[in-house]
Image (cartoon, grey):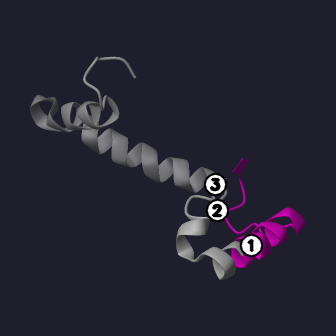
Amino acid sequence: QVCPDEHRGPDKADVKKFEMAAMMEQHGGAPATAGTMVRSKTFGDFDKLEKQIRTIATEPDNKGLNKLWRRIDFNGNNKV
């Protein structure tokens, strides 16, 4: 979900998610909640990512792009 307001407060669903995650962690430890919470994205997050990608794209000899490609093409089949 993209939210234009960077300081959006939690809604009812967010509160419930935090309660459930706390209960899961209490009963199963930290591994029980691994990957269950996702932070809402804002336009500021995308602007920051765009700046990072532009910096990578301007590196000489495409060093940054090649490194990024190897990371996302984890199995080396040139398909992502």
- Quadrant (top left, top right, bottom left, bottom right) of the C terminus: top left
Under mark 1, the amino acid is Phe
Q: Is residue 54 left or right of residue 37?
A: left
74 lies above or below 48: above
Residue found at the far left of this picture: 61
Q: Which mark is residue 39?
A: none
Residue at numbered disc 2:
37
Q: Is residue 33 left or right of residue 57?
A: right
**Residue 45 in view, yes or no:** yes
Q: Position of residue 8 (x, y in %)?
A: 76, 66
Badge 1: few (under 14), some or many (20 or more) residues near its Cα, within 10 Å? some
11 lies above or below 41: below
Residue at numbered disc 1:
18
Q: Which residues are magenta?
A: 1-23
Under mark 3, the amino acid is Thr
Q: Position of residue 53 (x, y in %)?
A: 35, 41
Residue at 30% in and 32% down: 74
